[in-house]
Image (cartoon, helix red, strand yellow):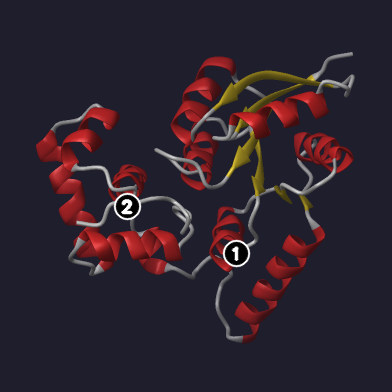
Amino acid sequence: MKRISVLLAEDHQIVREGFRSLLKHEPDIEVIAEAADGRQAVQLTRKLRPEVVVMDIAMPRLNGLEASRQIRKEFPDTRVLFLSAHSDDAYVEQVAVLGATGFLLKQTSSENLATAIREVKKGNRFFSHSISKRIQDRSRNSAARGESSKSSNKKHNQLSSREMEVLQLIAEGKPNKQVAAELGVSFKTVDKHRQHLMSKLDIHDVSGLTRYAIAEGIIESTVRVRIT
C-alpha cells in the first residue's frame, strides 16, 4: 500500500514530535520531513514533493499562509492542511480567501488529524467544526452585503509574495540589513520593498506595519517584536 507522504511544518519542536508520534501509528501515512518555519517548508516541498503539508499558520521568517501561497503556485497538486492554536477572525478570513481545503485547531484528536490528511489528499475539504461554522457565517455575511467572499482585505491582496515576506520580517523587528541577508537580496532592494509596502498600505512607520501584521494574522500578537 502506497502511503501518503506528509511534511510537518511547525516552529515548536515538541509539537512536531507530538504530531509525528501520533501519525507513525497510521499505516497509510508517512511523515517524510519536518520544517521549523514557512521558508523551510517551501524549500522542503520543492525538494521532496510531499502530497500533504500539515502547516502551522503562525511561524517565524515566513508564516504558513504565505508559505501556502507559494507552494500552491508552484505545486498545485500538493495539499495544505492548516493547523493553528487560534481561530482568530484574521486567520479564518485569510484561510477562506486562500480557498484552503483544511483547517484544524491544534487541540484536535489524532484521529481527526489522520482523517483530515486522508481527506485533503483526496481533494476534499476538512475543517474543525468551529472553523467551518465561522467560514460559513463569513460567507453568508459577505453574500448578504453583496460582497465576494474573496474580495475583502483589498490592501492585503495588493502585496506581492516578496512584499509579504518583507512585511513579516520587518514586523518581527528585523532591521533591513538582516532582512536582506535572510532573503538573499541587497539592502537597497529591501528598502525599495519597504517603501512599496508603506505606499500600498498607506502606513508610514514600522510600528504601523507591525500593528497591521498582527491585525491581519501575519504574525501573532504574542511574538516579541522590536518597534523602532
Quarter holding residue 21: top right
Quarter holding residue 111: top right
Front-lying residue, 148 or 9: 9
Q: Is residue 45 above or below residue 15?
A: above
> Residue drawn 47% across and 37% down?
70
> Residue drawn 18% across and 41% down?
176
SS at mark 1? loop
> Residue drawn 19% across and 51% down?
194
- Residue 29 is situated, as x and y percent measured from the top left of the image, at 81, 23
Quarter holding residue 26: top right
Kind of residue at disc 2: Ala
- Residue 197 is situated, as x and y percent measured from the top left of the image, at 24, 56
Marker disc for residue 40:
none
Q: Label 2: how many residues lie within 10 Å, few (<14), some (14-19) or many (20+)?
A: many
- Residue 155 is situated, as x and y percent measured from the top left of the image, at 35, 66
Q: Is residue 5 above or below residue 219?
A: above
Which quadrant of the figure contains the N terminus?
top right
Which quadrant of the figure contains the C terminus?
bottom left
Q: Is residue 173 above or below residue 67?
A: below
> Residue drawn 23% across and 67% down?
203
Kind of residue at disc 1: Asp
How many angstroms separate mark 2 from mark 1 (CA)? 19 Å
Which residue is tagged 2? 171
SS at mark 2? helix
Front-lying residue, 111 or 144: 111
Front-lying residue, 28 or 59: 59
Front-lying residue, 146 or 48: 48
- Residue 117 is situated, as x and y percent measured from the top left of the image, at 78, 36
Sequence order check: which comes first, mark 2 or mark 1? 1
Which residue is tagged 1? 88
